[in-house]
Image (cartoon, coloured by chain):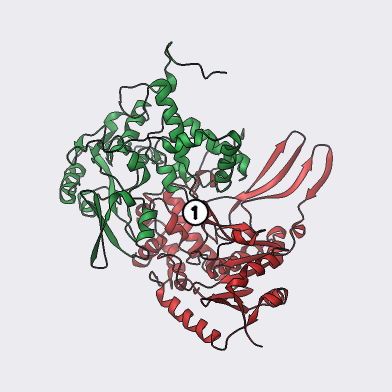
Amino acid sequence: MAEKVLKKEKVGEALKELSKFRLFAPSKSNGTILYKQIEDPSDACLDFGNTTVPAKKIVFPQTETLFRFMLGNPELKEKNVEEEGTTVVFGIRPCDARAMGIVDNLFSWDYQDPYYLKRRELTTLVGLACIQPPSINCFCTSVGGEPFSEENLDVLLVDLGEMYLFKAITEKGEKLKTTLGSQLDEAPSDAVKKSGELADKANVQIKRTIDTKGIPEKLPTLWENELWKRVSAACLGCGICTYLCPTCHCFDIQDEVEGAEGRRARMWDSCMFREYTLHASGHNPRPTRRERTRNRINHKYSYFPSKFQVIACVGCGRCINLCPVNIDILEILGQVVDA
Amino acid sequence: MVDNAKLKDVAKEVISREDVRLLIGYRPGTYGFRARPAFVENSDQVDELIFSPACVSNLSSYLTLEEKTPLPRGVEPDLRKVAVMVKGCDSRALVQQLVEKAYDREHILVLGIPCRGVVDMAKVENRFPGVISGEIAMEGDNLVFSFDGKEETVPKEELLAEKCKRCRYPTPLISDLLLDDEVERFADDDYSDITAMEGKSTEEKWAFWEEQFSRCIRCYSCRNVCPMCYCEDCVLDRLKPVWARRSVDISENTVYHISRAYHLAGRCIQCGECERVCPVDIPLMLLNRKFYRDVEELYDYEPGIKVEEKPLLSTFSVDDKEDFIL
């Protein structure tokens, strides 16, 4: 079947068509690029590096009602995710899409998380290949990804200058291709070849790399190594590295009551916070930022791979770019290798 | 600018002192033009220390951030001094911490750095994208960027942090050792943006802040980096009773930011760290500077100037203005 392209002048039209679904795309808010639900196509911004907050927030919202309850009424009113309807994430970077695939392991492991999994089922991911790595701290190629990775995407768009190559990868992707029918055009004969060349170029532009082989096996042997004190010394204990990580998935559950009514809600939590492991007794098994930093790295590079055979890091570089005190996971991993 | 060879010599002397257990300074970062905090425990580690316009962090926050675990029986706590490098703005945090009796004066040894300004790293990375490793120096009114074997000179005005363009106290207000000649005040805050904001209607102001606060992800980096936010048990972490819910929405986010701004009234020393670290670019200094100006105008008080001063909100004078009380 002939390949299709989406001409840039038709992007607005295509987004308008897709806005009949729950459509998310990168959008500029006060200079910060964030995913936003798009009603007006002009709000979308496809000329971006990567969003500050990863697309995980669309399938795993930072705050989510699980059910509502009322005094004197034994019935719980459960949230129906189905009602949210078909969701399209337009312009997701390949690393963020890979991350969702990684997190799927957790939410479908010992318990089938109905909220997350339903939302994943309803969501179509339209990826935008990285012609250039969005930041100098991108290291996707070190952890199994690529700037043009199709893993876990339904559609991959490749910026060819005047147009995007529109590559449907899954059945969901094919469906979207049909939906967009009239907005798509036949691809010029050299489009696929051109895209391949761009992919090769992009791969070699990743400047920072690390050989991750052996790290998952080595980490458990470094539990009391002095490196943890050194790499965590500057840590402020904020939630940037975890909240903005596309694979971090820890959550807290709280009941919020107002008068005779209330809701049970879950919300992102961070292992970098003191209260994360604080016991009711006052004891804290991770008493300082040294233990918390050690946990963050171990979870991604040891516990998760030992359970699911995949490193829970996609090399998006957000934790490095946005850390206020330049704590750098690549440097930490380098010290693990050298230890 | 501070001579880095001299800085290392001083640091070596200081960390070799028997009454000093730790020296907090700066060292080169892991990528680009960045610098990061350095924690020096012995004289072998001083060689990595630097000071440059890339040294943006306010290191005084670390004096109150340290988490102490219970000591094994028979082990005495290490009560030796912590030496800390501070720029003019950062030094005011030390003063204010001392005003509030956060720790004893003998607990710290202050290495003062008269400062001509630090960069806005976001602007620098915009100007020189993709640089793997480089250095920044200041020569007169220019910033000199060295990378990939070349040098580029940029007028400092273009890439300086906004707070530095308003800096009233470039020379540390407290120091045991001053690492360079004093720097005269070269700027002031004209509050023009605050005045413009005050001129807006309540509806406009609310719309503005609603948009800003709606981006907040409550990572608490603004709180954690703040040298004046050092409560061991923050009201925002309390689960019983809940003062601010953990849910992230415009209502709870607003509670968070307004609470923090009020807790900093008469205490914020204008280091601008909260705004620098915010991953979603919320202009927090607009709030903090509004309070700062109000405090200055109403009570003729600037926090973080004199160690002998009393905290503003725990003093009372019969002459205090009260015409704003409804």
Q: Quadrant of the N terminus of chain A?
A: bottom right
Q: Amino acid at mark 1?
A: Gly
Q: Which chain is represented by green in the image?
A: B
Residue at the image point whose x is 57% and y is 34% from the top = B201
On the question of residue A113 being in view, the answer is yes
- The structure residue drawn at horizontal position 63% and vertical position 65%, both measured from the top left corner, is A89
- The crowding category of the residue bearing disc 1, from other C-alpha atoms within 10 Å (few below 14, some 14 to 19, many at least 20), is few
Residue B223 seen by the camera: no
**Residue B23 in picture, x, y percent from top left:** 26, 44
**Which chain has been coloured red in this picture?**
A
Q: Quadrant of residue B267?
A: top left
Label 1: element kind? loop
Residue B164 in picture, x, y percent from top left? 33, 42
**Is residue B37 found left or right of B180 in the rendered image?**
right
Q: Residue furthest top?
A: B318
Q: Residue tagged by mark 1?
A: A31
Residue B191 x/y as whole percent: 41, 35
Say how many tags the image has.
Answer: 1
Q: Chain of mark 1?
A: A
Q: Locate residue B186: give its quadrant.
A: top left
Q: Check the picture and name the quadrant holding the C terminus of chain A.
A: bottom left
Tell me: B273 left or right of A5.
Answer: left
Is A193 placed above or below B62 here? below
State the residue in front, A126 or B70: A126
Q: Position of residue A94 (x, y in %)?
A: 54, 70
